[in-house]
Amino acid sequence: MDFSQYNNIYIMDHPLIKHKISMIRDENTGTNEFRKLVEEIAMLMGYEALRDLPLEDVEVKTPIETCMTPMIAGKKLAIVPILRAGLGMVSGITALAPTAKIGHIGMYRDEVTHEPQAYYCKLPSPIEQRTIVVVDPMLATGGSAVDAVDQIKKHGGINIKFMCIIAAPEGLERLAKAHPDIQIYVGNVDRCLNKDAYICPGLGDAGDRIFGTK
């Protein structure tokens, strides 16, 4: 599927990101290594996703003289993981922005309809004044991502970015169409969804692999 028609989709092409994604696909990658790789991928992707953060000049005294130098402006960044797998990406982004505020959106997927069911939403305030990065390792049907962004907008969020490691074409198109005003950052677009709405070739259940559960 060609996504060039969407000007809000950014598909990563950095060799380090591609290499680390290949490593987490491997079924022999254990929980500890998988978790670390997800953090590293999130940090590498976050570096790109945050390149447009606003700056303002502030006065700083160096050992030599006083100067005006740029620092990030406005309210702090908000990171909003979609529970539970999204938690695995948070530390990678906070490594770049340690003062970021963190919200949470809880959802689970109905095993019959494959649609998201929301059970929790807690966001930093004032959310409307923050750059918001929603994170979830997998964008499969797109239902959870669309619903999460819907909830953030209902709470007043405006400047929203979505970041995932692997996306199915079906889910990516659904999110881009539902929310054309947000920026979407994707590590890799995989082939398709299977009959159970899992991404192929994918990497299995990201939550189970991050937390070591079945």
Image: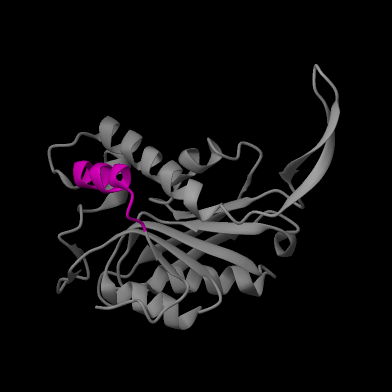
- 113 or 197, which lies in front? 197
Q: Residue at x 40, y 39 (%)?
A: 39
Using the rendered view, name the quadrant where residue 112 is placed: bottom left
In the image, 150 versus 117, the foreground residue is: 150
In the displayed structure, does residue 169 sit left or right of residue 161?
A: left
Count of all numbered marks drawn on residues in the image = 0
Using the image as rendered, state which of residue 75 and residue 141 is in the foreground: 75
The percent position of residue 128, horizontal first and vertical second, equals 72, 65
- Toward the top, the furthest residue is 63
Query: Magenta stretch containing residue 22, yes or no?
Result: yes
The reply, left or right, for residue 173 in relation to residue 198 is right
Identify the magenta region.
12-24
Q: Where does residue 56 sit, x and y in percent of width and height? A: 78, 49
What type of secondary structure mainly makes up the magenta span? helix
Q: Report the quarter where the N terminus lies.
A: bottom left
Looking at the image, residue 193 lies above or below residue 174: above
Can you tell which quarter of the image residue 63 is in? top right
Give left or right: position of 44 versus 122. left
Q: Residue at x 35, y 78 (%)?
A: 173
Front residue of 204/179: it is 179
**Residue 74 image position (x, y, % from top left):** 77, 52
Q: Is residue 105 magenta?
A: no
> Relative to 198, does residue 213 appear above or below in the rendering?
above
What's the residue at 55%, 74% (across, down)? 150
What's the residue at 20%, 41% (across, down)? 23
